[in-house]
Image: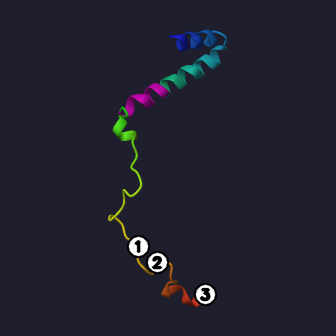
Amino acid sequence: MMIETAILKNLKKLPESAKQAVLDYIEFLVNRYAQEPPKTEKAAKRGGLGIWKDKIWMSDDFDEPLEDLKDYM
């Protein structure tokens, strides 16, 4: 509740035009957070080393010059 009290205390010090800007921003934030699904602990957890093992591959000649570019080298 301290945060809300501090916000209201400082809001009273602002001119009307700034108060309108604060209101617009608060409405923006409310809409933004209302549309986001709640983050679960599982969604925030990232995979570790080796999660792509055996799922991707790279050609053995990946670093070799391309045939199409021989004229430019």
Q: Which residue is mark 1?
A: 58
* Amino acid tagged 2: Phe
* Residue shown at the point (36%, 60%) measured from the top left: 52
* Residue at (61, 13) in percent of width and height: 11
Residues at marks 1 and 2 touching, judged by CB atoms closer than 8 Å: yes
**Numbered circle sitting on residue 73:** 3
Task: Answer with the quarter of the image where residue 9 lies.
Answer: top right
The residue that disc 2 covers is: 62
Q: Residue type at mark 3: give it.
A: Met
Is disc 3 surrounded by few (<14), some (14 to 19) or many (20+) residues within 10 Å?
few
Residue stretch in magenta: 29-37
56 vs 21, nearest the viewer: 56
Q: Which quadrant would residue 53 be assigned to in this image?
A: bottom left
Q: In the rendering, at what x and y percent does residue 54 appear?
A: 32, 65
From the image, which quarter does the C terminus lie in? bottom right
Callout 2 secondary element:
loop
Asked whether 35 falls inside the magenta stretch, the response is: yes
Label 3 vs 1, first from the N-terminus? 1
Q: Residue furthest left?
A: 54
Q: Position of residue 28 (x, y in %)?
A: 49, 28
